[in-house]
Image (spheres, rainbow, N blue to C red):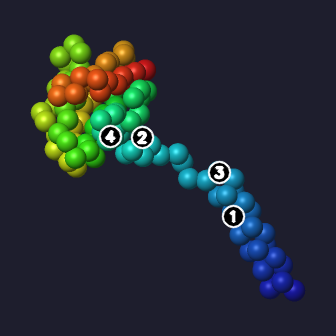
Amino acid sequence: MFTGRFRLLQRSAGAAMLCWVLATGPAPAETPDAHRIVVKNFMFAPMTLTVKAGSTVTWSNMDEEPHTVSSDTGLFRSGAMDTNEIFSFKFDKPGTYHFTCSIHPRMVGTIVVD
């Protein structure tokens, strides 16, 4: 009789734990791609990215041509990035930051820092 109650208690506890895990799920984690801008087909994607102050944004050149990332105020500027090269910049202060590719000036984007 004791064994039966113990097993019932075990199953109930296990079921409760499973329900709790499924209901709460893992804590949301920010993925590295959350602050990534891809350079491809002579475009920045996304063209506008919103991040929190203190975030680092990484640009990845996936194009067959070299590109740069240059802020319109001179705050940051990459060298020419070849295919599969990256450039990163940490945005410490809230604001709106516009950037372009200095090689291809029609390529433009914006970082909004909250």
> At numbered mark 1, what does the secondary structure look like: helix, strand or loop?
helix
Which sits earlier in the primary sequence, circle 1 or circle 3?
1
Give the side of residue 64 with respect to residue 8, left or right: left
Which sits earlier in the primary sequence, circle 4 or circle 1?
1
Q: What residue is shown with label 1?
A: 18
Q: What residue is shown with label 3?
A: 24
Label pair 4/3, CB-CB below 8 angstroms:
no
Residue 113: give x, y in percent of width and height.
39, 22
Q: What residue is shown with label 2?
A: 34
Q: Is residue 112 above or below residue 22?
A: above
For the point 54% across and 48% down, which residue is it? 27
Q: What residue is shown with label 4?
A: 41
Residue 58: give x, y in percent of width and height.
29, 38
> At numbered mark 4, what does the secondary structure look like: helix, strand or loop?
loop
Task: Confirm whether residue 58 shows in the render.
Answer: no
Give residue 41's quadrant in the image: top left
Kindly identify the amino acid type of the residue bearing the numbered disc 4.
Answer: Asn
Which sits earlier in the primary sequence, circle 2 or circle 3?
3
Kindly identify the amino acid type of the residue bearing the numbered disc 1.
Answer: Leu
Which sits earlier in the primary sequence, circle 2 or circle 4?
2
For the point 87% across and 86% down, which residue is it? 1
Q: In this view, does 102 lie above or below 15?
A: above
Gap in Å between the C-alphas at discs 4 and 3? 40 Å
> Closer to the observer: label 2 or label 4?
4
Kindly identify the amino acid type of the residue bearing the numbered disc 3.
Answer: Thr
Of all residues, the one furthest to the right in this rendering is 1
For the point 65% across and 51% down, which residue is it? 24
Q: In this view, does 21 lie above or below 61?
A: below
> At numbered mark 3, what does the secondary structure look like: helix, strand or loop?
helix
Residue 63: give x, y in percent of width and height.
26, 44
Mark number displayed over residue 44 = none
> Closer to the observer: label 2 or label 3?
2
